[in-house]
Image: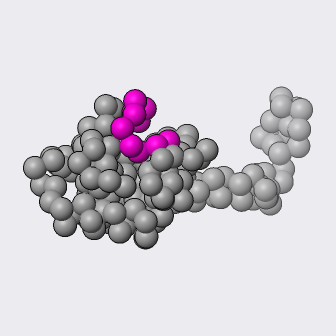
């Protein structure tokens, strides 16, 4: 009894095709390649996102807020950032998103400027609030946070 016949008897199958190199893994190999490619793409995309928006960036402070920054933030809020679509023209909130006027903040702890900036740059998980809405830049997010913080603290009107 040769080696192949011995294994066939032992495992209850004929492995001659496998030993001859004729075995075709077919869909299994294709599925594994697809899965490996998908995992690699997700890892690559995640690394790219971290490079574009570094997590360890220094947090902004309120001493940098000027009237010009607030007005720029107002323009971005009502323009490219499309923030008004969810938060309302006068920041009054809608069914989609909360008010940004003085209120009990849920995601930007106590309405602190740094937390408002964090929400604009990181989004809010499990909500429609995305990071860098409308494709705004970190500098534009800083201006929007300045505007929202100024309105929420009563320093300017919406």
Identify which residue is drawn at 23% across, 48% down.
155
The magenta stretch is 98-108
Pinpoint residue 51: horizontal percent, then vertical percent.
Answer: 31, 59
Is 89 left or right of 71, judged from the image as shown? right
Is 38 left or right of 14, judged from the image as shown? left
The answer to whether residue 46 shows anywhere in this view is no
148 over 112 or under it: above or below: below
150 over 134 or under it: above or below: above
Identify which residue is drawn at 61% across, 44% down.
95
Q: Residue furthest left?
A: 63
62 within the magenta span: no
In this view, the residue in front, 25 or 30, is: 30
In this view, the residue in front, 2 or 88, is: 88
Residue 64 sits in quarter: bottom left
Residue 106 sits in quarter: top left
- The C terminus: image quadrant: bottom left
């Amino acid at each position: 009894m040769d080696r192949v016949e011995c294994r066939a008897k032992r495992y209850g199958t004929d492995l001659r095709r496998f030993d001859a190199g004729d075995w075709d893994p077919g869909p299994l190999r294709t599925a594994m390649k697809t899965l490996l490619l998908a995992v690699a793409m997700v890892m690559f995309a995640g690394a790219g996102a971290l490079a574009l928006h570094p997590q360890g960036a220094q947090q902004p402070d309120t001493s940098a807020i000027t009237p010009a920054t607030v007005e720029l933030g107002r323009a971005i809020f009502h323009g490219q950032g499309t923030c008004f679509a969810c938060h309302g023209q006068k920041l009054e909130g809608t069914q989609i998103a909360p008010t940004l006027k003085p209120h009990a903040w849920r995601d930007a702890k106590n309405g602190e400027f740094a937390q408002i900036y964090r929400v604009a740059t990181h989004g809010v998980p499990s909500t429609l609030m995305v990071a860098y809405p409308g494709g705004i830049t970190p500098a534009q997010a800083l201006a929007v946070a300045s505007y929202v913080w100024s309105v929420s603290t009563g320093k300017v009107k919406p």
